Amino acid sequence: MSQKSVLITDDSRMSRMMLSTIIKDLHPNWVIETAEDAQTALALTKTKSFDLFTIDFNMPGMNGLDLAEQLKPSFPNAKMALLTANIQDTIRNKAELIGVQFIAKPITVEKVAAFVGN
Amino acid sequence: MNDNSDILNEIQLDALGELLNIGMGSAAASLSTMVQQEVLLTVPVIRIIHQNDVPKQLDDVPPQKVCGVKQTFRGNFSGDALLLFSEEKSLSLVRAVLGDSIPLEELGEMEEEAITEIGNIILNACLSSLANIFKEHLDSEIPQYLNEDIEQLFNVDNDDDCFVLLLRMSFSIAKQDITGYVTFIMDLESIAKIRTQINNMLGM
């Protein structure tokens, strides 16, 4: 598969590490960037382009759904997933409404592979 | 006030126990995915007690120091959800989840963040399940790592409203000999709202 770039936004270092490791194993040539909050993610997107986004919901500052909504106009063709432990139907429905895939934590290879492709 | 039936009758307590069962089932499934082995759950215990008495209710011999995660939730009913286990089991849990993917020397450094994320996943699975059943939305605050004396954790200074609904279920991961507790602490106002929710659900 051609080289793609991914932005992982999650306030948990453990989650960022696990996601990075899984995506690197699946696609060794992909470029992976990480951000610990929405502001850092938004700053990164000012200078770089991304094909895929994984976004945590519950983070200090802006939440993941608001971040996704802000990113959508700039990245209309990017794949976005809300990857969260908050598996309430209200969150799932909001994600679907704005065209963001919903992935329930815990993170597994299967769930990540289904999103990024094998 | 120590008598549960003053606030919740037998049917309501039974319903709450069942809801907690469902919520913890979801949390246990998440934990089981993380540690890749079976997670055993105990029967839920529900008590309305003084907050200062919570440590005595957690175990026959509660650990002096506890480690875990606290997540405050707000909505139609509000409170704190806590994941607790004895301090010495903390690193074992992190190892059980991360396996050999992290070098041993980095494991200790990762401990606090890893426990916080594990707690976030477990507590949110349980809270989300309850919110979904009640068709409510609960806002969760950022999970907070805990490592402190158990008496200190539940010590309250004000006497205004310090009776709490204690929902407790313990889980265990046999291979690692890890036992922990999930506890919800809610004040009387929230307990009354839960009671209304249960009544609506049961058509009472």
Image: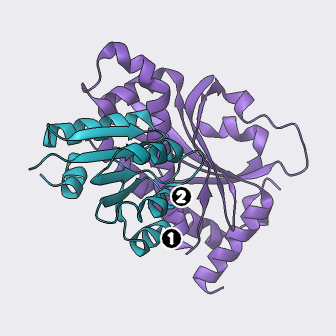
Chain colours: A cyan, B purple
Q: Position of residue B9 (x, y in %)?
A: 70, 70
Chain letter of mark 1 equals: A
Q: Nearer the viewer, residue A1 or B82?
A: A1
Q: Which residue is mark 2?
A: B127
Establish if A109 lies above or below A89. Answer: above
Establish if A94 lies above or below B43. Answer: below
Comparing marks 1 and 2, which lies closer to the viewer?
Answer: 1
Question: Is disc 1 placed on a helix, strand or loop?
Answer: helix
Chain letter of mark 2 equals: B
Q: Nearer the viewer, residue B14 or B77?
A: B77
In the picture, the quarter occupied by the N terminus of chain B is bottom right
**Which amino acid, by three-letter code, is at mark 1?**
Thr
Establish if A56 lies above or below A94. Answer: above
| Residue plotted at (34% across, 52% down) | A53
Category of crowding for the residue at label 2, using alpha-carbon neighbours closer than 10 angstroms: few (below 14), some (14–19), many (at least 20): many
**Which amino acid, by three-letter code, is at mark 2?**
Leu
Q: Nearer the viewer, residue B147 or A58?
A: A58
Q: Nearer the viewer, residue B23 or A1?
A: A1
User: Which residue lies most toward the front here?
Assistant: A47
A24 to the left or right of B157: left
Label 1 and label 2: CA atoms lie apart by: 13 Å
Q: Position of residue A69 (x, y in %)?
A: 47, 64
Q: Position of residue B54 (x, y in %)?
A: 70, 40
User: Which residue lies most toward the bottom here?
Assistant: B203
Category of crowding for the residue at label 1, using alpha-carbon neighbours closer than 10 angstroms: few (below 14), some (14–19), many (at least 20): some
Q: Which residue is mark 1?
A: A90
Query: Is residue B170 visible in the rendered structure shown here?
Result: no
Q: Position of residue B116 (x, y in %)?
A: 50, 36
